[in-house]
């Protein structure tokens, strides 16, 4: 496996993370074998599987539901796709929320973000706004450390696993470069956990599985602005193998837990 590269945000630039070779192609046989093993693990309902479950370990994560932190991440990205001038971020946030809530459904019957936002009290929405704008400003600070153009991604990478109810999600907030030499960025709150590198490898694996040709990203970069740390993973075949084992282990725990609860 390639060793993780740890960089301090105190450095003037993060361009050292942009070096390296283009990501290799993971063969279709390997991709199919992994997805078939995952499909063999039954779950009773649509279940999200991502790096968060791997980093959390055996603790029960539970079904997806919106929270202030999850909403802030999504909204900060939407805001930065509209506006990158700090003084106009607040207005961009209000526009995004208005467009999401205008056609919101009943929050009791739908999981979409607009419905969840529409159900919030003014105080709760103000808290989400504060977190989203704080995150957007932190992200702008990270982007400014690269001399190359950085594109905010409209969504994470998702893959619905055939013959199963698993939904894979590879988290990413921005991308540098093109498909053949893409570097993915994740901006995260707090400090990196002991399993942060494992989580980055999982994000890289899922992005590889979503890519039509199975090409891995050249590097997966996690940035923790509040702690001043950056971790970069250059995924080799062994890195993706370990990530696959971690994902299968997490899926097995979820499947076993669901089976026990149904018994």
Image: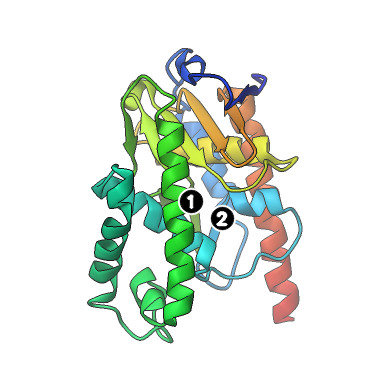
Q: Which image quarter is the N terminus in?
A: top right
Asked if residue 104 is positioned above or below residue 25 in the image, the reply reads below
What residue sits 56% from the left and 38% below the top? Answer: 225
**Looking at the picture, how far across and down is residue 102, in whole percent?**
23, 76
**Element marked by disc 2:** strand
User: How is the structure coloured here?
Assistant: rainbow
What residue sits 23% from the left and 68% below the top? Answer: 99
Using the image as rendered, state which of residue 56 and residue 35 is in the foreground: 56
Q: Which mark is residue 30?
A: none
Q: How many numbered marks are there? A: 2
Neighbour tally class for label 1: few under 14, some 14-19, many 20 plus, Cα within 10 Å: many
**Looking at the picture, how far across and down is residue 138, in whole percent?**
47, 42
- In the shown orientation, is residue 252 left or right of residue 84? right
Q: Quadrant of residue 43?
A: bottom right
Q: Quadrant of residue 257?
A: bottom right
- Tag 1 or tag 2, which sits nearer the N-term? 2
Q: Which mark is residue 169?
A: 1
Q: Quadrant of residue 238?
A: top right
**Looking at the picture, how far across and down is residue 180, in whole percent?**
35, 22
Confirm whether residue 121 shows in the render.
yes
**Looking at the picture, how far across and down is residue 64, in whole percent?**
53, 68
Pointers 2 and 1 in contact (CB under 8 A)?
yes
Q: Name the residue beneath numbered marker 2.
A: 49
Q: Label 2, label 1: how many angstroms apart (C-alpha)? A: 6 Å
What residue sits 60% from the left and 42% below the top? Answer: 226
């Amino acid at each position: 496996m390639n060793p993780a590269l740890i960089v301090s945000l105190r450095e003037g630039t993060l361009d050292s993370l942009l070096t390296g070779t283009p990501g290799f192609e993971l063969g279709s046989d390997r991709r199919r074998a992994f997805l078939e093993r995952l499909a063999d693990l039954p779950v009773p309902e649509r279940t999200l599987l991502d790096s968060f479950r791997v980093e959390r370990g055996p603790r029960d994560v539970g079904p997806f539901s919106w929270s202030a932190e999850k909403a802030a991440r999504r909204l900060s990205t939407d805001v930065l796709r509209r506006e990158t001038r700090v003084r106009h971020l607040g207005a961009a946030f209000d526009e995004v929320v208005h467009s999401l809530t205008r056609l919101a459904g009943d929050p009791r019957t739908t999981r979409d973000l607009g419905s969840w936002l529409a159900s919030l009290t003014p105080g709760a929405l103000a808290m989400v706004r504060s977190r989203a704008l704080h995150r957007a400003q932190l992200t702008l600070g990270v982007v400014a450390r690269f001399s190359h153009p950085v594109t905010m991604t409209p969504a994470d990478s998702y893959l619905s696993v055939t013959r199963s109810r698993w939904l894979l999600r590879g988290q990413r907030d921005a991308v540098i470069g093109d498909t053949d030499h893409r570097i993915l960025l994740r901006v995260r709150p707090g400090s990196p956990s002991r399993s942060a590198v494992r989580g980055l490898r999982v994000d890289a694996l899922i992005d590889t599985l979503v890519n039509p040709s199975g090409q891995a990203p050249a590097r997966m970069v996690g940035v923790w602005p509040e702690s001043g740390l950056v971790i970069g993973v250059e995924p080799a075949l062994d890195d993706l193998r370990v990530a696959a084992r971690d994902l299968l282990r997490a899926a097995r725990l979820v499947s076993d837990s669901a089976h026990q609860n149904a018994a």
